[in-house]
Image: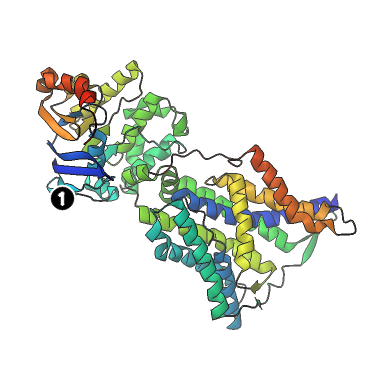
């Protein structure tokens, strides 16, 4: 029972990080029909910015601001210098552009810093534990869940209440109709990239507090999981992305914890089992949890 | 108010409009009629900035707006109720209306939003419903209400009665009548040719991308060319 509860809390922790990333991917897919494979690089940017600041006397007190700020800037910059110019090209061109950006990012960090991993200090309290009803939790678990909940609440408010949010949702459904309302395409797309950057920045903070290190290809693992979470949820659906992320996180930790540890170590198959479950899910529901049935952009 | 001068618009190799010209004066309701495939929607979409003409000019209140972005045109006082309405089905009625007022200052948007339920009583009960759940008639009223949120000086309507039941067609015509009485300048594309021409100040007949007749609503309604155009439109065929 204790093990189950702890596993669930762990799963929600990892899953909420996936959810934040998947939400950004879903958001960009909504306004541009682009699955942004460069999205994970925003974590890498945050990691190297942290590494740089810690070399020059940084502190975790203000590091989240630097991480989130740099992720937002990087996200908006990729749109400005890369995606804007191929906006009306085929989805395949957009996809290739994002692959190119991802590779470019890997190469840049290898050249500018080092191909090797660079570590920096973690916040002192991360692995402090406290007991609740006989079960011990880490502070980081609680921080992760609270920060994610607050971020999701903010996201819901922005997309429900503000003109920016309503414009993005309208543009995601029918871009030309949104233009006819006077919505400026550049502004709405830039804004969507900024918001996706914010979400990735928050995710990066949570990731880097647990494992404070930077390496050139660290974004890719997270990206793959986030894309899967977004697709499981139904690309373009916000609540789907969140649920997809949480489900994926729970599946991973549960399979890791409960797969039988017979001689060969079945727990190592956790990822494989997770993917098999997801593949089976897609056979049953090819469009994800929430089907998004928008008309194609003309 | 609006001058369309010798507009030619192409979709790739296909020319949909061949130097079409028309004019809408302040306070007028102008009807644009013609058979399917004549280029009526192309003309409205070109005026509204969704399509860029290959040649010709469009002027709004004397300013050249040829090929301008829709975002600029809305700010210049033009709004289009597009073909098939294209309301945002995932957004609520209220959110659709707010988005319609995307270009107006927040205070003004709020006061227009407060007036909307009086002007369109059917929307009141569905205020927080996703627009995808509205009936055809409600959706059409929402599309018009949404366009009016920017308080356009020129309102373009593309087939506002398309797909509606006869009683709802009456509702839409009453709405057009009401807007006309308020002095709203309108250019309306309508399949229901005789009926819209009875309401319109003037009309244009478009066939295979060319304006083939123009006149007052009554003149055109009595014109045999109109009738022939609908019947004979297919025999000539093609958009060449």
Left/right of residue B75 with respect to residue A221 in the rendered view: left
Image quadrant of residue B42?
Answer: top left
Left/right of residue B80 with respect to residue A103 in the rendered view: left
Tally the numbered discs.
1
Secondary structure beneath dot 1 equals strand
- Position of residue B211 measured from the top left corner of the image (x, y, whole percent): 14, 33
Q: Quadrant of the C terminus of chain B?
A: top left
Q: Nearer the viewer, residue A223 or A262?
A: A262
Residue at horizontal 31%, vertical 39%?
B149
- Position of residue B179 measured from the top left corner of the image (x, y, whole percent): 23, 29
Q: Nearer the viewer, residue A222 or B170?
A: A222
- The single residue placed furthest to the right in the displayed view is A263
The answer to whether one can see residue B96 in this image is: yes
Left/right of residue A12 with respect to residue B13 in the rendered view: right
Q: Quadrant of the N terminus of chain B?
A: top left
Mark 1 is surrounded, within 10 Å at the Cα level, by few (under 14), some (14 to 19) or many (20 or more) other residues, namely few
Residue behind mark 1: B64
Q: Nearer the viewer, residue A274 or B86?
A: A274
The answer to whether one can see residue A132 in this image is: no
- Position of residue B166 measured from the top left corner of the image (x, y, whole percent): 33, 16
In the figure, A262 relative to A237: above or below?
Answer: below
Q: Which chain contains the residue that carries disc 1? A: B
In the figure, B209 relative to A262: above or below?
Answer: above
In the figure, A274 relative to A285: above or below?
Answer: below
- The single residue placed furthest to the bottom in the displayed view is A56
Left/right of residue B62 with respect to residue A194 in the rendered view: left
Looking at the picture, the colour scheme in use is rainbow
């Amino acid at each position: 029972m204790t093990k189950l509860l702890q596993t669930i809390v762990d799963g929600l922790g990892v899953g909420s990080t996936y959810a934040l990333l998947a939400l950004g991917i879903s958001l960009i897919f909504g306004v541009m029909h682009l699955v942004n494979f460069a999205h994970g690089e925003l974590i890498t940017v945050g990691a190297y910015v942290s590494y740089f600041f810690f070399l020059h006397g940084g502190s975790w007190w203000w590091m989240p601001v630097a991480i989130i700020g740099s992720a937002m800037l990087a996200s908006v910059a990729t749109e400005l210098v890369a995606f804007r110019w191929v906006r009306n090209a085929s989805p395949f061109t957009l996809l290739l552009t994002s692959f190119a950006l991802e590779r470019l990012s890997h190469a840049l960090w290898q050249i500018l810093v080092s191909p090797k991993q660079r570590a920096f200090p973690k916040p002192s309290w991360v692995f402090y534990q406290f007991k609740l009803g006989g079960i011990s939790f880490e502070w980081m678990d609680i921080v992760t869940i609270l920060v994610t909940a607050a971020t999701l609440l903010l996201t819901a408010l922005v997309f429900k209440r503000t003109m920016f949010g309503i414009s993005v949702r309208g543009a995601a459904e029918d871009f030309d109709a949104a233009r006819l309302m006077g919505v400026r395409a550049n502004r709405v797309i830039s804004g969507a990239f900024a918001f996706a950057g914010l979400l990735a920045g928050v995710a990066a903070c949570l990731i880097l507090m647990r494992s404070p290190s930077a390496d050139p290809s660290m974004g890719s693992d997270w990206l793959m999981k986030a894309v899967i979470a977004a697709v499981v949820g139904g690309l373009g659906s916000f609540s789907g992305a969140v649920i997809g992320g949480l489900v994926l996180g729970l599946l991973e930790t549960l399979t890791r914890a409960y797969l039988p540890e017979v001689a060969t170590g079945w727990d190592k198959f956790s990822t494989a089992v997770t993917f098999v479950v997801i593949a089976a899910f897609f056979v049953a529901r090819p469009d994800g949890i929430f089907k998004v049935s928008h008309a194609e952009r003309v | 108010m609006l001058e369309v001068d010798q507009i030619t618009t192409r979709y790739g190799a296909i020319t949909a409009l061949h130097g079409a010209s028309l004019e809408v004066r302040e306070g007028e309701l102008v009807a644009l009629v013609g058979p399917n495939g004549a280029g009526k929607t192309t003309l409205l979409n070109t005026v509204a900035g969704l399509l860029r003409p290959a040649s010709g000019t469009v002027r709004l209140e004397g300013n050249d707006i040829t090929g301008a972005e829709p975002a600029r045109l809305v700010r210049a006082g033009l709004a289009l109720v597009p073909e098939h309405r294209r309301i945002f089905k995932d957004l609520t009625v209220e959110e659709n209306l707010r988005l319609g007022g995307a270009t107006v200052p927040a205070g003004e948007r709020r006061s227009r939003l407060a007036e909307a339920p009086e002007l369109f009583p059917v929307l009141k009960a569905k205020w927080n419903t996703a627009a995808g759940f509205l009936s055809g008639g409600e959706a059409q009223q929402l599309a018009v209400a949404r366009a009016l949120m920017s308080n356009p000086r020129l309102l373009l309507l593309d087939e506002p009665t398309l797909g509606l039941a006869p009683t709802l067609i009456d509702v839409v015509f009453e709405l057009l009548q009401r807007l006309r009485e308020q002095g709203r300048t309108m250019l309306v594309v309508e399949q229901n040719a005789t009926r819209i021409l009875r309401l319109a100040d003037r009309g244009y007949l478009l066939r295979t991308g060319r304006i083939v007749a123009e006149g007052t609503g009554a003149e055109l309604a009595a014109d045999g060319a109109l009738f022939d155009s609908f019947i004979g439109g297919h025999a000539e065929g093609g958009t060449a």
